């Protein structure tokens, strides 16, 4: 029996460890910059120097400031995203001083970002400093999210509401889940496993899980499950760990004519979601014009009995508009952290749906679960987990998601989607065998799809023998190197990847690529390698006319995406067999399952095959595809 107080106290400790690690990392970044601040800094989380642009106001009346900087064309996957906190600093020689103001990113563009600031005084101080010093901007620490998680865990431990207590006991393993009997639901446009998942969603009384491996139609299933639930309930709460994920599922529901009320900062929403944001709906309400006039009149400073009557009417209208917006909505959507937003206070829902639950920190989930009688989680715990920066917190269990725990505790609550519509079956089979007990099978329309009838879906280019003697590949050895930012790169392997990509394109022809709109993805686990690959690709005139067909990024950046052809650069090449975080096999599962018709892996089989997963993968490719060894007379150096 799990002790509830101990369980949630431990989670709070882990949240505190993670916050402390983020704060320390932030300080380290700021301190380290002072030792080599002689030129520009263009990192995923830092820009220096910056130039101050125009200032103004955003839709919420907050002061905004435009920051401009030089573009590093090799930069990939910026950490700066709308809604993330940033701090500014100024440098004088090797001395760096942080400004005492935290802003939030609103817009990120080419060579610029717009941030919101807390006050006019902050804006003026920044302008004054900008006239005397070089300024920079770097990613800050989101203290608000940690506060919300800690408070949610405290409330989850002491909340004794009977229905919530029952749900809490099931989720931590102190009680068994229960199910009700519901007549069979069936949708002819869904496959049997998708229909099974929806059946379990409507029958579950505490928790159910839709486990959706890559390409199995998880979003389609979840949308139908939400719509079917709305046949029995007036309103549901739909959450996800990120704004992008919330927007995606909300957009799918809107396309099915579901009234969605999107809660959160409109500046962090996609353009498509603005129309259903709380703020936009509030301003569009029939009574808003009267409310606006009252506010304007009160702002002019009137006194006496008339002012009191207007204030009472203002309160009455605010309550009415708020109630109308929530009462009209069938789905209320927000991030997990956003469920603690002021507007959501005292709101309760019969059912909470958490999309991408396998990427959500457990403490964030509890913030939303506090508002629900039952929870439906959707995701794939065999893909990338949430990022945890503190090694101690990760070892302590913060990297283990609530979805993972429930899958282990209550397998009867899990429905695996088993038909995948994305990949050629030869690409799918190894992932199915290793991660999904061999239960996946490819839909007929995807099973045998190839870029070319003469092609094979799987190729491994083995760099174990180091370099190739061709003119295109002239580096003397194929070994990994540590970059200045701490990432890894492998220059010879990067050149080989570009060479392989060009050969493949020439084999299928650029005309075919244009006519059939074939797209390519180059994936690598390391940012340093992604940066190098992008630089090498830009150096070759051959690829310029195809640049819109080719995307380069890290595994993390590619989760949720897919391409016709995927080339993976694994980077690791050393005599000791060290493979770093490639030991997290979920990373490789994501990389391999992005490919629809062709998967090419470039890597040192000798280094990687010391791990059973990669050894079996190379054997699988030898049997089902092509295994090509790059021969050389030069021995690899560690």
Image (cartoon, helix red, strand yellow):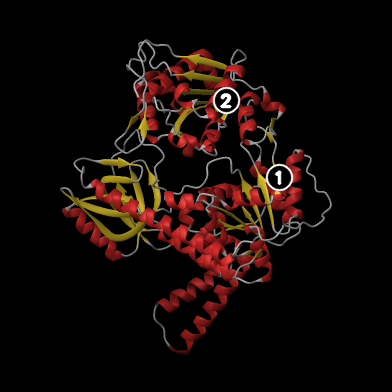
Q: Earlier in the sequence, mark 2 or mark 1?
A: 1
Label 1 residue SS:
strand
- As displayed, is residue 299 above or below residue 348? below
For the question of whether residue 340 can be seen, the reply is no
Q: How many marks?
A: 2
* Residue at 54% from the left image edge and 67% from the top image edge: 343
For the question of whether residue 245 can be seen, the reply is yes
Relative depth, front residue between 563 and 36: 36
Relative depth, front residue between 463 and 192: 463
* Residue at 34% from the left image edge and 58% from the top image edge: 56
Q: Position of residue 249 (x, y in %)?
A: 60, 48
- As displayed, is residue 450 above or below residue 210? above
Q: Which residue is identified by label 2?
A: 616
Q: Is residue 511 left or right of residue 30?
A: right
Q: Tell me, for residue 415, which label it has, or none.
A: 1
The CA span between labels 2 and 1 is: 28 Å
Whether tag 2 and tag 1 are in contact, CB under 8 A, the answer is no
Quadrant in the rendering for residue 638:
top left
Label 2 residue SS:
helix
Q: Is residue 593 left or right of residue 476?
A: right
Q: Position of residue 15 (x, y in %)?
A: 46, 58
Q: Tell me, for residue 562, which label it has, or none.
A: none
Quarter of the rendering occupied by the N terminus = bottom right
Q: Position of residue 153 (x, y in %)?
A: 53, 64
Nearer mark to the viewer, of 2 and 1: 2
């Amino acid at each position: 029996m799990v002790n509830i107080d101990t369980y949630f106290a431990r989670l709070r400790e882990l949240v505190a460890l993670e916050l402390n690690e983020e704060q320390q990392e932030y300080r380290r970044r700021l301190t380290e910059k002072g030792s080599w601040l002689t030129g520009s800094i263009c990192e995923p989380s830092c820009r220096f120097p910056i130039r101050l642009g125009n200032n103004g106001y955003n839709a919420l009346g907050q002061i905004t400031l435009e920051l401009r900087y030089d573009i590093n064309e090799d930069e990939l996957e910026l950490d700066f995203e709308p809604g993330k906190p940033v701090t500014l600093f100024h440098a004088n020689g090797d001395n760096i001083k942080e400004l005492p103001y935290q802003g939030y990113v609103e817009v990120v563009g080419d060579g610029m970002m717009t941030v919101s600031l807390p006050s006019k005084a902050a804006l003026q101080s920044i302008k004054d400093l900008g006239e005397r010093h070089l300024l920079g901007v770097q990613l800050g620490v989101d203290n608000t999210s940690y506060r919300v998680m800690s408070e949610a865990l405290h409330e989850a431990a002491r909340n004794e509401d009977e229905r919530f207590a029952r749900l809490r006991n099931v989720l931590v393993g102190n009680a068994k889940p229960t199910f009700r009997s519901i007549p069979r639901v069936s949708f002819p446009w869904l496959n049997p496993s998708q229909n099974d998942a929806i059946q379990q969603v409507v029958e579950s009384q505490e928790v159910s899980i839709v486990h959706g491996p890559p390409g199995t139609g998880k979003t389609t299933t979840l949308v139908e499950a939400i719509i079917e639930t709305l046949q029995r309930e007036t309103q549901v709460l739909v959450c996800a760990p990120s704004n992008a994920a919330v927007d995606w599922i909300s957009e799918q529901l809107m396309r099915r004519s579901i009234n969605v009320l999107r809660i959160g900062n409109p500046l962090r929403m996609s353009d498509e979601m603005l129309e259903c944001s709380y703020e936009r709906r509030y301003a569009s309400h029939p009574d808003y014009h009267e409310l606006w006039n009252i506010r304007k009149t009160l702002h002019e400073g009137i006194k006496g009995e008339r002012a009191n009557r207007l204030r009472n009417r203002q309160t009455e209208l605010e309550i009415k508009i708020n109630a109308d917006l929530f009462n009209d909505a069938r789905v209320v959507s927000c991030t997990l952290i956003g469920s603690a937003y002021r507007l959501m206070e005292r709101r309760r829902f019969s059912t909470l749906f958490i999309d991408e639950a396998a990427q959500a920190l457990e403490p964030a989930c509890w913030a939303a679960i506090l508002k629900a009688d039952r929870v439906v989680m959707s995701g794939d715990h065999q893909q990338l987990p949430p990022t945890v920066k503190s090694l101690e917190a990760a070892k302590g269990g913060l990297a283990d998601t609530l979805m993972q725990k429930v899958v282990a505790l209550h397998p009867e609550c899990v429905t695996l989607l088993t038909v995948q519509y994305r990949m050629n079956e030869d690409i799918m089979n190894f992932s199915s065998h290793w991660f999904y007990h061999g239960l996946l099978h490819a839909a007929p329309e995807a099973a045998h799809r190839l870029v070319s009838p003469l092609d094979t879906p799987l190729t491994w280019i083995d760099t174990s023998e180091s370099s190739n003697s061709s003119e295109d590949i002239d580096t003397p050895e194929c070994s990994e190197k540590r970059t200045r930012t701490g990432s890894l790169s492998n220059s010879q392997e990067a050149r080989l990847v570009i060479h392989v990509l060009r050969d493949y394109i020439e084999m299928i022809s650029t005309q075919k690529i244009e006519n059939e709109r074939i797209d390519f993805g180059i994936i690598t686990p390391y940012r340093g390698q992604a940066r190098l690959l992008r630089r090498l690709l830009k150096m070759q005139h051959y690829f310029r006319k195809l640049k819109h067909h080719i995307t380069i990024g890290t595994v993390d950046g590619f989760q949720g995406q897919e391409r016709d052809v995927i080339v993976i650069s694994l980077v690791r090449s050393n005599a000791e067999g060290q493979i770093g975080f490639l030991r997290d096999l979920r990373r490789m599962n994501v990389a391999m399952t992005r490919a629809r018709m062709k998967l090419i892996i470039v890597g040192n089989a000798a280094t990687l095959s010391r791990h059973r997963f990669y050894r079996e993968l190379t054997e699988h490719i030898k049997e089902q595809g092509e295994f090509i060894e790059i021969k050389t007379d030069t021995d690899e150096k560690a």
